[in-house]
Image (tube, rainbow, N blue to C red):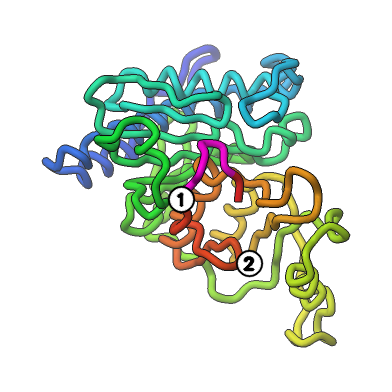
């Protein structure tokens, strides 16, 4: 135990050690590793804020401002975006794209990495103490500039992952060679707990917002109807529905227990192309899911093969 007011000494950070070892002498890998370490620093700050909850102020209170995509920002959305941007400014990052920014920001001339981030996924959960997270995606900075760095297939990512702030803070990461899971310990160090995480092949859970059933297109309804029919239906077994209203939370459960997450396009205005942002949410999460042995699709095309037509494109 430590004396009151004395922080425990941070243990060696396995995340930074492992990334340095992975990068070796390769310049692009070294830049990727440095950027990921900076993002991890930002997630520590966001984790500390979420632990305080209401003690840190009204984190779930709307600021009165809308982000670039028309969604109203919460106080923690803004603080999280500031934390990530601040952490990246000292790294090898040429361009920064965020769900909370209207345009791509240029950070460092000659930087090797372009970072896209959803600083706080699931912000509607802030006041309910349910899981929220930070999603991040790294590309090599393109010679064609800021736009070319992000308007490309998700398969060109060099790294992606997310932090989830729940009963504990975990960071899941891929650099294109499987998925590793780290957990933030009491000293503030990320410790490796699972290397080469894979999605279980058998599952009985699915995640979808069933309140939108009347707006879904027929193929989605038919699929969910089959699951709801349970043991008497064509699949011959019962399923459980789970819905956290947080991509990070629902995806994290799938990585641990298997299953499927759906946020389909539907007939409502503004939902015709789906609701998840391709650049900040769907592409990085698809990279993680594929690296863990799963699949990610819009129903016709693998998410990682899609090229965004605009910065805040949905899918």
* Image: magenta residue range: 308-313
Instruction: Residue 71: give x, y in percent of width and height.
Output: 70, 30
In the rendered structure, find residue 259 and report the number of the disc placed on it. Answer: 2
Q: Is residue 206 above or below residue 190?
A: below
| Secondary structure at numbered mark 1 | loop
Q: Earlier in the sequence, mark 2 or mark 1?
A: 2
**Residue shown at the point (38%, 60%) measured from the top left:** 196
| Secondary structure at numbered mark 2 | loop
Q: Is residue 180 left or right of residue 109?
A: right
In this view, the residue in front, 198 or 279, is 279
**Residue shown at the point (47%, 42%) measured from the top left:** 171
Instruction: Residue 129: give x, y in percent of width and height.
Output: 73, 35
In the rendered structure, find residue 307 and report the number of the disc placed on it. Answer: 1
Instruction: Residue 110: give x, y in percent of width and height.
Output: 22, 24
Q: Is residue 68 left or right of residue 176?
A: right
Queried whether the magenta region covers residue 223, the answer comes back as no
Determine the CA span between mark 2 and mark 1. 26 Å
Queried whether the magenta region covers residue 309, the answer comes back as yes
In this view, the residue in front, 34 or 101, is 101
**Residue shown at the point (88%, 60%) measured from the top left:** 214
Mark 2 residue crowding within 10 angstroms, few (<14) / some (14–19) / many (20+): many
In this view, the residue in front, 202 or 294, is 294
């Amino acid at each position: 135990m430590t004396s009151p007011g004395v922080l425990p000494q941070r243990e060696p950070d396995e995340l930074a050690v492992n990334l340095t070892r992975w990068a070796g002498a390769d310049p692009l890998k070294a830049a990727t590793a440095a950027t990921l370490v900076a993002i991890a620093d930002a997630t520590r700050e966001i984790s500390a804020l979420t632990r305080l909850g209401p003690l840190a102020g009204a984190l779930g209170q709307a600021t009165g401002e809308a982000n670039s995509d028309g969604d109203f920002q919460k106080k923690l959305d803004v603080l999280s975006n500031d934390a990530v941007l601040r952490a990246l400014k000292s790294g090898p990052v040429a361009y920064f794209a965020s769900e909370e920014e209207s345009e791509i920001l240029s950070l460092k001339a000659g930087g090797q990495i372009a970072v896209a981030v959803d600083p706080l996924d699931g912000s509607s959960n802030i006041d309910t103490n349910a899981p929220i997270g930070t999603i991040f995606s790294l590309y090599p900075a393109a010679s064609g500039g800021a736009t070319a760095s992000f308007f490309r297939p998700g398969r060109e990512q060099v790294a992606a992952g997310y932090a989830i702030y729940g009963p504990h803070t975990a960071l899941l990461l891929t650099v294109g060679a499987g998925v590793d899971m780290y957990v933030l310990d009491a000293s503030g160090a990320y410790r490796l707990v699972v290397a080469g995480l894979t999605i279980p092949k058998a599952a009985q859970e699915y995640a979808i917002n069933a309140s939108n059933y009347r707006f879904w297109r027929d193929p989605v309804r038919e699929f969910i109807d089959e699951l709801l029919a349970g043991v008497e239906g064509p699949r011959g077994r019962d399923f459980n529905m789970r819905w956290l209203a947080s991509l990070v939370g629902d995806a994290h459960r799938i990585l641990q227990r298997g299953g499927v997450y759906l946020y389909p396009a539907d007939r409502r205005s503004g939902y015709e192309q789906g609701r998840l942002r391709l650049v900040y949410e769907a592409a990085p999460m698809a990279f993680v899911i594929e690296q863990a042995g799963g699949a990610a699709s819009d129903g016709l095309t693998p998410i990682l093969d899609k090229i965004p037509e605009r910065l805040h494109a949905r899918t």
